[in-house]
Image (cartoon, grey):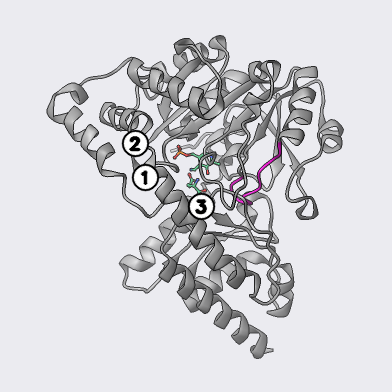
Amino acid sequence: MKISKKASRVEPSVTLAASAKAQALKAAGSDVLSLTVGEPDFSTPKNIQEAAILSIKSGKASYYTGSTGLPELKQAVIERTKIDYGLTYEPKEVIITTGAKFALYALFQVLLDPDDEVIIPVPYWVSYGEQVKLADGVPIYVKALQENDYKITLAQLESVRTEKTQAIILNSPSNPTGTIYTKTELTEIGRWAVKHNIVIVSDDIYGKLVYNDHTFVPISSVSEEIRKQTIVINGVSKSYAMTGWRIGYALGQANIIAAMGNILSQTTSNPATASQYAALEALNGTQETVEKMRKAFEMRLNTIYPKITALPGFSVKKPQGAFYLFPNIQKTLQMCHYQNVDDFVNDLLEESQVAVVTGAGFGSPENIRLSYATNLDTLEEAVRRISDFIESKIKEH
Ligand code: PMP
Ligand code: GLU
């Protein structure tokens, strides 16, 4: 059978591919340590699990909800956003989706006409560019420099802006770098977007995962005019250890949200009803578990970071949020006589059974990504193995 040109052009998610490869090796009996996929190793907190079970037993989960989500869950999103952001949204400005990933997908379908451009800072999360292309848009990549803490500047944005620029994607804290933009920086970018009527797609999924006294400032909270220019993307996957439940949401202008609703009604319909009841408890119930998990990630970061920076040739700035380390390993590659990062990553997996993700999928082929959303023993053993691997490669020559 023929595969469409559009589908042939889509790259699979490198994070999910790397994680699947590691899992397959594990299933075949290999002692692989996987630092690939970005998902908390904690299971979903009990109160959330129980809310879902109750919705199943009571029969409520047997049925469709409206395709844009349960009204109670929209209300819970509104309340949580009021508490966390200090902003008030109306129910018609909220939509519940099958993961934040589908919120982004539906949003690009709504925002873009063929050849419309979307500015994407590099390094980027793997799905942004592909989703823009699936909506017939054109990703315009702008390299955020390591020397500038992986933040793009206004001058860079201005240099790529054209008549076709429809949107810019901001992901702070960032996957993969963990960088957080400051209020001043966000104000500048926000004003620029307002001035040129460019939609700000603000992917806030790691907003609750910030460490060592850094703070997350949502760009939507900077000013009312910037809020109006912004579509907020968020979800429960990362903060509530709920990746498997597939609940995300978007907040923004009612006409955009309504158009996203039409797309949902013709594609996914509502996200699984039991998952929506679980998310309702996540947002309305105790937030103590969120803080417990955040502290655990912070402790892992603080323990593992010095060991990672000590690896030969590794250059990595300490992340402020999310749960990834994104070392530049250009020097290591030279020391170990590798031509590219993909070969290094493949050999590391085959010879030392440590799975990491190549930076190429994030637009940054000098880096690798390591997720520290896994237990400390695994992390420490992985660093030992990486260190031995590098030493052995240096000695080989
Ligand atoms: N945005 C970013 C930056 C992410 O890392 C992820 C993780 N997959 C998502 C969005 C989507 O999350 P989910 O679909 O699980 O809600
Ligand atoms: N966002 C996670 C990651 O970057 C999950 C994988 C994915 O959705 O691609 O690892």
Give the CA distance from mark 2 to mark 1.
7 Å
Magenta stretch: includes residue 176: yes
Which x, y percent locates residue 142? 76, 41
What secondary structure is found at the residue carrying circle 1?
Answer: helix
Residue 393 occupies which quadrant of the picture?
Answer: bottom right
Q: CA distance from mark 3 to mark 1?
A: 26 Å
Q: Which residues are magenta?
A: 174-182
Q: Position of residue 341 (x, y in %)?
A: 65, 65
Determine crowd level at label 1: few under 14, some 14-19, many 20+ residues with C-alpha closer than 10 A: some
Residue on which the image places disc 2: 286
| Real-space CA distance between mark 2 and mark 3, rounded to the nearest whole angstrom | 31 Å
Q: Earlier in the sequence, mark 2 or mark 3?
A: 3
Q: At label 1, which amino acid type do we have?
A: Thr
**In this rendering, which labeled residue sits more in front, label 3 or label 1?**
1
Residue 175 highlighted magenta (yes or no): yes
Position of residue 211 measured from the top left corner of the image (x, y, whole percent):
56, 51
Q: Is residue 283 above or below residue 225?
A: below
Disc 3 crowd rating (10 Å Cα; few below 14, some 14-19, many 20+) is many
Mark 3: secondary structure: helix
Inspect the image, locate mark 2, and give the three-letter code of the amino acid beneath it: Thr
Q: Are marks 2 and 1 in contact (CB under 8 Å)?
A: yes
- Identify the residue position indicated by label 3 in the image: 15
Beta carbon of the mark 3 residue lies under 8 A of ligand 2: yes
Question: Along the horizontal axis of the image, is 57 left or right of 271?
Answer: left
Mark positioned earlier in the residue sequence (3 or 1): 3
Q: Describe residue 260's horizontal placement relative to residue 178 as left or right.
A: left
Across and down, in percent, residue 317 comes to 69, 59
Please give the residue where the numbered disc 1 appears in the rendered image: 289
| Crowding near the residue tagged with mark 2, few <14, some 14–19, many ≥20 C-alpha atoms within 10 Å | few
